[in-house]
Structure formats: structure tokens, C-alpha cells
Image (cartoon, rainbow, N blue to C red):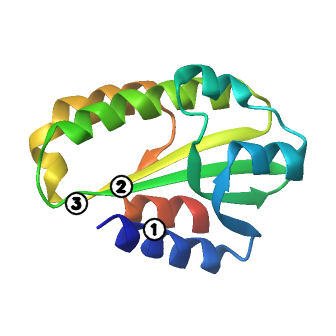
Amino acid sequence: MGHLAEDKLEEILQKTGNPYYKEVTLETIKERYNIDISQLSNRKVSSKRFDYIMEKNGELYLFESSYYTSNGSKQNELSRSYTEICKAINNIQGLHFIWVVDGNGWKSSKNALEKAYNVMPDVYNFSELEEMLYA
């Protein structure tokens, strides 16, 4: 389901008309934008690859997408991990972390998603993301 979520996210980003790139690593961000977010490597995500990065009005938006058809422990771990990543990224001026999460599997993991939603300013499902980007 991961690739389906990435494909849906790419479809939405294409419609914005803003430049975006797929599967962007920390190293690529440093090389392309001269922005060092190597502090993420201290959180054991040195090989971190973001699904997409989009440029808009001089700001950079780093996207992760998740879609779950069933529940499991992965949602809880992903919520914790993305919350930490968000804190690090959003402390850098001009960078924003957006997590797009959708699917019925989250219904049974509402607590984990609610915790992330209360900490992260940009958690959306696909419909909400489209509304936000096209507004």
C-alpha cells in the first residue's frame, strides 16, 4: 500500500504546479539546498528518505505518506518516529514536515494518531491535503 500512497501524493503534488522531487535523502537536501538536517541522523534515521520534497514560495515541504488497511504496531511506532522528525525539521526556518496518513487501519490506532496530531502541525489525510494545497 506504500507505493499507492506515494502515487496518490505525487498526483496531488503535480496539480500544485510547484517543483517537487521524489525519494529525497538527507544528503540530497544538504547538497541541493545547503540545509543540514543531519541532527536526524542522531535519531537513528541517517538513511532517512522522504517520499517527496516540494518547493513553494521559498519554503521546503518534506512529505511522508502512509496508508493502512489494517491495524498493527507499525502505526504506533511510525507516529512516534514522525513526531520526533517533525520536531527537528520544524525547528529550522523554511522547512516543514507534512505527514499524509489515510486508510481504515488507523481507526483502531486512534490514540497514536491523535497524539501525533496534537504535536505535529501538519498531519492530513489525502482529502485534507488537497484542500490545504489548493486553497
Up/down of 37 relative to 133, above or below: above
- Count of marks, rendered view: 3
The quadrant in which residue 112 appears is top left
Mark 2 and mark 3 lie on one chain; the one further toward the N terminus is 2
Q: Are marks 2 and 3 in contact (CB under 8 Å)?
A: yes
Helix, strand or loop for disc 2? strand
Query: Can see residue 135?
Result: no
Mark 2 and mark 1 lie on one chain; the one further toward the N terminus is 1
Q: Which label lies toward us, 3 or 1? A: 1
Q: Give me the C-alpha separation between circle 2 and circle 3.
A: 8 Å
Residue at 59% x, 68% y: name it.
134
Left or right: residue 37 versus residue 123 is right
Q: Position of residue 52 (x, y in %)?
A: 61, 60
Q: Position of residue 31 (x, y in %)?
A: 87, 48
Q: Give me the C-alpha separation between circle 2 and circle 1.
A: 8 Å
Which amino acid, mark 1? Glu
Quadrant including the C terminus: bottom right
Determine which residue is flagged by label 2.
Answer: 66
Which amino acid, mark 3? Gly
Determine which residue is flagged by label 3.
Answer: 103
